Image (spheres, rainbow, N blue to C red):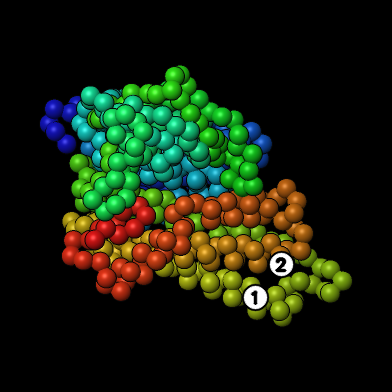
Amino acid sequence: MSPSVQLAVKPSATPTVAEFHARLDALLPLVESRAAEAEAQGYLTDDVVAALRKAGIYTMLFPKEVGGAELLPYDAMTVIERLAYAHASAGWCVIGNNMEGTTLAIYIEDEGIKKVFAGGPDITIAGNGVPRGFARPVDGGYMIRGNWAYGSGIQHAEWVHSGCFVTDASGKDMVFGPNGQPKIVVTHHPRATIKLMGNWDVLGLRATGSFDYTLSEGDELFVPTHMTYDFDIGAPRRGGVQGALGLAGYSAWAHSAWAVGVGRRMLDELVKVIVQRQDPFGKSRDSASFKFQFAQAEARFRAARALVHETWKDVSETCAGGESPSLEQMTMIKLSLRHVHDVLSDVATFAHRAARGASLHNTPMQRFYRDIHSGTQHILMADQIVEECGRALLGLPGPGAQWTVFGVTG
C-alpha cells in the first residue's frame, strides 16, 4: 500500500483465532434464537448482524493494511464452520462479506481504499460479482447498467459489488480478451445507488436476503476506475502472501467453510430423530439397514470434510511460510469445494429420507435440508470447473498457468 494512504485503523492488537472462537461462543445462542425470525422476514435480524460485526467476524480475512485481522484461511474456516452449523444463512452472509470485502481490499487502488475504509475495517458489502451487467468505458471509469441477482446480505450492506461485461465505448459490443473470453470488471458502489427487487421467495437460504437488484436512478451509474478491478486480475496490491489466493481462492474458501458446517448439522439432526423414534417396524436405531447406511454417510462426510481441512491447512501453512499457493494447491481448493458439495447433497438426501417425515415439518432439520440443496446451486459447483481441475491434475496447463474463478489460464 502506498505510504500516502491513511486509514482509521484502531491501534489494538490483532485478535487471534482463539479470541474469535471465544467471541463466537458468546454469540451462538443469539444466532440460533433469531433464526426463525430471520427465515420469516427473509434476511438476518439487525441484532445478529450488529453482534457479528462488533465481534469482527464479518471481517476476519480482511488484510491488516486496512485494519483487518487477516486470519489464515484455515483458522477463519474453523470459525465459519461453527457459525454455519448454528444457522446456515448467517454463515452464508458472513462468508460473503469476508470474501467480497477481502477481494475489494486487496485489489482496488489506493484512492478507493481510502474511500471505503475511511472509518476502519468494519464495513459490510454484498452483491454479485458474476457478470449480469455491462460496463462501457468513459474518462476516469465506467458507466454501468444491468440487473443483478443473488445479492446475499444486501439488506445490511453499505457497499455493493457488481460484475459487468466490458463493452466498447458505444456500449453495444462486448470486449474480449486475448484468451477469447469476455472481459469482465467488478465494480463497487454505495448501497444508495441500487434498489432491491423484493423477490427473495426461495427453497432455502431464506434468511440471506439474496435479493435481485438494479440501479436506483437512471439507466447508468458512473463508477470510477479506482473502485473497480479486473475479474481475472493477477497479483494483489495488498493482503500479504495469502492475497495471492485472489477471487478464485477466496470464493472457494467461503463455500467450503460453509459446507462443512451445514453438513455436520444435518447428520446431527438425524441422530436426534432416530434415537427416539419407533414405528411399526420397531426402533429405527435398531435397524441393521439404517445403521449400515448411516455409518457410510458419516464416513463419506468426514472424508470430504477431511479433504477440505487438509487442503486449506496445507495452503495456510504455505502462506504462513511466506510463499504463494501453487497451481496444484489451487486445483485442490477447487476440487475439494465441489467434492464436499457432492457428498453434502447425497448425505442430506439420505438423512431426509431416513427421517421419514421429520424434516417435512418446520424444524432445523428441514431448514438445513433446504439450505444445503440451495448451496449446491452456486455457479462455483459447475462441472466445467471440475473439468479444469482434471486438466490441471494431468499437467496439461503450460508454464505460468494460473487459476481464475472459472478455469485455468494457460
Kindly identify the amino acid type of the residue bearing the numbered disc 1.
Gln
Find out whether the residues at labels 1 and 2 contact each other: C-beta distance under 8 Å: yes
The crowding category of the residue bearing disc 2, from other C-alpha atoms within 10 Å (few below 14, some 14 to 19, many at least 20), is: some
Q: Amino acid at mark 2?
A: Ala
State the residue at coordinates (33%, 26%).
143
* Above or below, comparing residue 218 to residue 241 in the picture: above
176 or 44: nearer the viewer:
176
Chain-order first, disc 1 or disc 2: 1
Point out residue 335 in the picture as x, y percentages from the top left corner.
40, 65
Q: Position of residue 208 (x, y in %)?
A: 55, 40
Whether 373 is drawn above or below 166: the answer is below
Question: In terms of image quadrants, where is residue 228?
Answer: top left
Residue at image x 33%, y 23%?
222
Q: Is residue 321 visible?
A: no
Q: Is residue 105 left or right of residue 400?
A: right
Outermost residue on the left side: it is: 3
Q: Is residue 78 left or right of residue 297?
A: left
The percent coordinates of residue 98 (x first, y second) are 38, 42
Instruction: Check disc 1 and report its element: helix, strand or loop.
Output: helix
Q: Position of residue 344 (x, y in %)?
A: 55, 62
- Residue ID at (28%, 30%): 169
Quadrant location of residue 137?
Answer: top left
> Number of marks in the image?
2
Q: Is residue 2 above or below residue 267?
A: above
User: Mark 1 highlights which residue?
Assistant: 293
Q: Which residue is mark 2?
A: 354
Q: Nearer the viewer, residue 292 or 216?
A: 216
Q: Quadrant of the C terminus?
A: bottom left
How far apart are labels 1 and 2 at the CA level?
Answer: 9 Å
Residue depicted at x 30% and y 68%: 392
Label 2 element class: helix
